[in-house]
Amino acid sequence: MATTGRVLAHYQSGAQTRRIDELVRAAGGMFVQVHPDTARRAGLVEGAKAAVVSRRGRTEATVRCDDSMRLDTVFLPFHFAGSGRANLLTNPALDPTSRMPEFKVCAVKLEVA
């Protein structure tokens, strides 16, 4: 299961904060955060490129292993644009009243990129 969210160095989509060199260096590029055992089962290691695939799409990200992650969950930041964006994987549905995006959670498969 994948979930998306923020990283400290970027605000919302990152359209403004990705233009500030210090913040870009602090956040790095697109990544997928996973438990080390989850990475190992997918044939991945820290720093490797992974393909994250859902029924809606595919993106590539650098693997970041984190012992505090659940074994059944991966995290992707939503601040990055282009072909590396997390929203390629998720449902584009909006709340009919507020027009806010629904929570971004979806089933994914990790593969060696």
Image: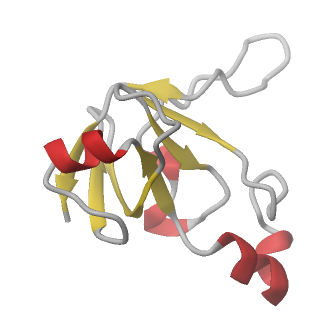
Residue 43 can be seen in this image: yes
Extreme residue in the bottom direction: 21
Position of the C terminus by quadrant: bottom left
Residue 13, percent from left and from top: 74, 55
Extreme residue in the front direction: 67
**With 61 as the anchor, is 8 left or right in this view?**
right
Residue 53 can be seen in this image: no
Extreme residue in the top direction: 97
Position of the N terminus by quadrant: top left
Residue 17, percent from left and from top: 84, 71
Residue visible at 56% across and 73% down?
A: 29
Where is residue 4, by image quadrant? Answer: top right
**With 90 as the anchor, is 104 left or right in this view?**
right
In the image, residue 94 above or below residue 34:
above
Residue 53, percent from left and from top: 27, 44
* Colour pattern of the rendering: secondary structure
In the image, residue 110 above or below residue 103:
below
Residue 109, percent from left and from top: 23, 38
**With 9 as the anchor, is 87 left or right in this view?**
left
The residue lying toward the viewer, choosing from 67 and 72, is 67
Where is residue 89, by image quadrant? Answer: top left
Residue visible at 72% across and 54% down?
A: 7
**With 32 as the anchor, is 48 left or right in this view?**
left
In the image, residue 50 above or below residue 99:
below
Residue visible at 78% across and 67% down?
A: 15
Residue visible at 46% across and 64% down?
A: 84
Q: Tag count in the figure?
A: 0
